[in-house]
Amino acid sequence: MIFTPVNKPAKPPIKNVILAITGGIAAYKSAFLARLLIKSGFKVRVIMTEGAQAFVTPLTLQALTGNEVHTELLDESAETGMGHIELAKWADLMVIAPASANTLARLAMGMADDLLATVCLATAAPVMVVPAMNQQMWAHPAVQLNTQTLGDLGYTLIEPARGEQACGDVGAGRLPEPEVLLEQVLHFATRQSQPQILAGKQVTITAGPTIEAIDPVRYLSNHSTGKMGFALARACRDAGAEVTLIVGGKVNLPTPFGVTREEVLSANDMLQAATESAESGCDIFIATAAVADYRTRDAAPQKIKKTQESMTLELVKNPDILATISQEYPEIFMVGFAAETQDVEKYARSKLAAKQLDMIACNDVSRSDIGFASDDNAMTVFFANQYKKQPVPLEKASKDNIAQRLVTLISDTLS
Ligand code: C5P
C-alpha cells in the first residue's frame, strides 16, 4: 500500500522538512530520524502531539534539531515565533512518524483539533505518513479504512514493518528503522525534483556474482560486489521506472526502496529469473552481473572428501544470459557491461554485435582505482550502429553518478 505519485513534473528540491511525531513507543526512533535528516542536509522542524511528549521530551528534539519544537496550536507565545500557517508554508515536505491510529483517524476526517492536524490541512507540501502501532490495531478494519482514505486524499503512505513489537506481539505495525525511513524520504525527495525520464518503463537488472556449486558446501564464484547494479537500480527507480533487480551469489547490499529484488545463486537460476522477468513485460534489460563463465558438469551430492592427492573438476560453459534474452526478446532495449584490460573499443564493439545489444558500457579493469569492489567507476559507452552515435566517455565518478549518466544515455537513445 505504498502510494507514490508518478509522472509528475519535476519540482524544486526539497529542503525544509517538518517531522511530526505522535504518541507511540516508536517515537524514540524519530529522534534518530531527525538526526539523519539533518545529516543529509535537510532543515528540520519538529511538531509533537501531546501523546508524543509522553514518550520523548520536546527538549530532546530541540537539542537534536537546534530549533524550538512546536507543540501548541492556540498558544500566543508559540504563534509569535512561527505560527501554524507559517510553519505550513515553510515546509517542502512533512513526515508523520510514527502516525498513531488516532492521528490516522483525525487526518482521514480532515480534523483540525491540534497543531499537527491543522498544519496537514494548511500545507501545500506533500505529506508522508508512517503508521506504527500494535499489530492487532493495525489490522483493524477501521484503521485500514482510514489509511485507504488517506491514500485517496493524496497522502503518501509508508507501510509499517513486520516483526517483534514492544508489547511482545509479532506482526505488522513496527515503525521502519530510521535509516530505512531516511532512504524513503531521500527517494521521495529525489523523485519529486528529478525528471521522470523512464516513467512507465519496466527495467530488469542483473547484479552480483553467480555461485556454481561444487558440492553442498563449496562453490565457484568471483569478487563482484553488485554495487554497480544496485546503483543502476536506484537511478532507474529515481527516473520513474519500475525496477526488478536479480541478484546472484551472496550480495550483502540493502535492497533499494521500491525495487523488487529476486535472489538467485547460479547462472542457470539467473537465466530463469531473467526469462520470467522478460516474459512478464520488460522494456529495458541491463546486465551488470559477473556471471561465472563455467560451472561444474555435475555438482557432487555429498561433501567431497580430501582422500585424493589431486583432483580434477570438469567444467562446462554457462548460458550467456544477456545474449539469450537479447535473442529471444528482440523488442527489449539491451544494455551490457564489459570489463577489458586492452583494446577496449575493439572488444566492446565485437560484444555489442555478438550479443545484439543496443548499448555497452565498457571499463578498463587494468586500472586499480575503479571497477569491482570500488565505489567509483569510469567507462566508455558504445552504441549499436543503428543509432549512429559516437562513443561517450564517462569520467571517473561514484557508481551512483555513473549510473545516473547511463540512465540519461539509455533514455536519450530510446527516444
Ligand atoms: O562476455 P562477457 O562476460 O565479457 O560479457 C559481459 C556482459 O555480458 C555483461 O553485461 C554480463 O552481465 C553479461 N553476461 C551474461 N551472461 C553470461 C556472461 C556475461 O549476461 N554468461
Image (spheres, rainbow, N blue to C red):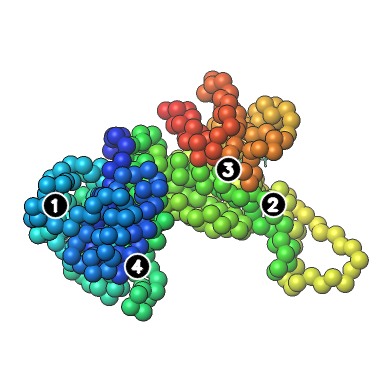
Dot 1 falls on a residue whose secondary structure is helix
| Residue type, mark 1 in image | Ala
Residue 11 lies in quadrant: top left
Residue 413 visible somewhere in the drawing: yes
Ligand 1 within 8 Å of disc 2? The answer is no
User: Taking 10 as reference, is 203 above or below it?
Assistant: below
Residue named by callout 3: 375
Ligand 1 within 8 Å of disc 4? The answer is no
Mark nearest the camera among 4 and 1 is: 1
Residue 6 visible somewhere in the drawing: no
Classify 10 Å Cα crowding around label 3: few (below 14), some (14-19), many (20 and above). Answer: some
Expressed as whole percent of the image width and height from the top left, the position of residue 351 reads 66, 33
Classify 10 Å Cα crowding around label 4: few (below 14), some (14-19), many (20 and above). Answer: many
Dot 2 falls on a residue whose secondary structure is loop
Expressed as whole percent of the image width and height from the top left, the position of residue 179 reads 42, 56
C-alpha span from label 3 to label 1: 47 Å
> Dots 1 and 2: beta carbons under 8 Å?
no
Residue named by callout 2: 222
C-alpha span from label 2 to label 4: 37 Å
Classify 10 Å Cα crowding around label 1: few (below 14), some (14-19), many (20 and above). Answer: some
C-alpha span from label 3 to label 2: 17 Å
> Dots 4 and 3: beta carbons under 8 Å?
no
Q: Pick whichever of labels 3 and 1 is earlier in the sequence.
A: 1
> Dots 3 and 1: beta carbons under 8 Å?
no
